[in-house]
Image (spheres, rainbow, N blue to C red):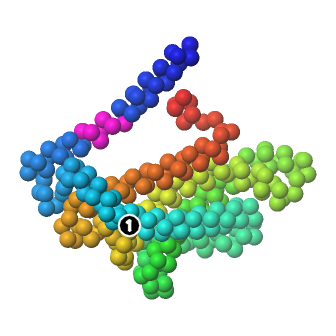
């Protein structure tokens, strides 16, 4: 029985892998054929085989590693600051009526302003150095986490709060032991959205004012007609974005192991 069950799991895993690579394989083969047949100009777009060759070369000489480290440092700092402040202020607004009246109207008025619109103001106050790039990412992350944290806290099952009151728990303990734990799934889901937005803002910041990083690499390659370098940068961003999202997804599963959802039934 165990052998049969293991075979079924193995077969299902292979089936999932094959299903996942069907579309990418078709796209890559069509892309390669189009470039080689001259349907796509080589001066504007490189073939997948050329991108792979250039990727290996840039990894070997350390160029790609340098740009990756620069971008990841900016992303981690901005994302960390943004989600920390977003969760903190969202929790305060969600649990305390006074903080809600003081902070929520102002923050909700500013949130509709697209994060990219803050770039000129950040450059005026902080220049074109690292600070403005990190703060741009922090702004986007903060807005996402603030809204979702406040909403998640307020959406806690009222029966749990009533039970805590019946047991004589103080307000602070209710917030720490009931409201925040029940908000963890929503906060982690919002973090994944904020991370995707952070990658977008990172590339925008590096394109506008930078001399290093993956965004700068992509834009510089585009300006000087190096399509292979441009695509290497894009593929690297996609790979790192997927890796960081997978890390958050794993954290979400670990921290919400108590929750049984439709997703778990689908992936059994």
- Residue 188 placement (x, y as % from top left): 59, 52
Q: Residue furthest top?
A: 1
Q: Which residues are magenta?
A: 20-26
User: In the image, what residue occupies the spot 49% across and 67% down?
Assistant: 73
Q: Is residue 233 visible?
A: no
Q: Is residue 186 magenta?
A: no
Q: Quadrant of the N terminus?
A: top right
User: In the image, what residue occupies the spot 29% across and 41% down?
Assistant: 24
As drawn, 30 above or below 195: above
Q: Quadrant of the C terminus?
A: top right
Q: Is residue 223 left or right of residue 118?
A: left
> Which residue corresponds to mark 1?
67
Q: Residue furthest front?
A: 60
User: In the image, what residue occupies the spot 22% across and 71% down?
Assistant: 223
As drawn, 23 above or below 120: above
- Residue 44 placement (x, y as % from top left): 16, 61
Q: Is residue 61 left or right of residue 190?
A: left
Q: Nearer the viewer, residue 220 or 121?
A: 220
Q: Main secondary structure of the magenta part?
A: helix
Q: Is residue 106 left or right of residue 170?
A: left
Q: Label 1: few (<14), some or many (≥20) within 10 Å?
A: some
As drawn, 215 above or below 4: below
Q: Secondary structure at mark 1?
A: helix
Q: Is residue 133 visible?
A: yes
Number of labelled discs? 1
As drawn, 8 above or below 199: above
- Residue 147 placement (x, y as % from top left): 59, 61
User: In the image, what residue occupies the spot 25% across and 57% down?
Assistant: 54
Q: Residue furthest left?
A: 38
- Residue 203 placement (x, y as % from top left): 38, 66
């Amino acid at each position: 029985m165990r052998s049969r069950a293991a075979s079924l799991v193995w077969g299902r895993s292979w089936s999932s892998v094959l299903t996942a690579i069907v579309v990418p394989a078709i796209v890559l083969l069509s892309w390669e054929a189009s470039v080689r047949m001259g349907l796509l100009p080589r001066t504007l777009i490189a073939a997948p085989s050329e991108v792979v060759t250039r990727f290996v070369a840039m990894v070997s000489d350390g160029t790609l590693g340098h740009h990756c480290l620069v971008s990841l440092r900016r992303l981690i700092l901005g994302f960390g600051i943004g989600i920390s402040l977003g969760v903190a202020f969202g929790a305060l607004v969600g649990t305390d009526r006074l903080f809600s009246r003081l902070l929520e109207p102002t923050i909700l008025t500013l949130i509709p302003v697209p994060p990219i619109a803050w770039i000129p103001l950040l450059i005026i106050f902080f220049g074109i150095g690292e600070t403005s790039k990190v703060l741009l990412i922090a702004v986007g992350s903060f807005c996402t986490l603030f809204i979702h944290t406040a909403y998640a806290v307020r959406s806690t099952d009222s029966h749990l709060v009533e039970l805590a009151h019946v047991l004589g728990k103080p307000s602070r303990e209710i917030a720490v032991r009931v409201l925040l734990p029940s908000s963890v799934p929503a906060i982690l889901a919002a973090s994944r959205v904020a991370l995707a937005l952070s990658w977008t803002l990172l590339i925008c910041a590096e394109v506008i004012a930078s001399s290093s990083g993956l965004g700068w690499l992509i834009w510089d390659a585009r300006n000087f007609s190096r399509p292979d370098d441009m695509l290497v940068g894009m593929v690297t961003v996609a790979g790192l974005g997927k890796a960081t999202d997978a890390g958050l997804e794993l954290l979400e599963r670990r921290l919400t192991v108590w929750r049984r959802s439709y997703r778990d039934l689908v992936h059994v």
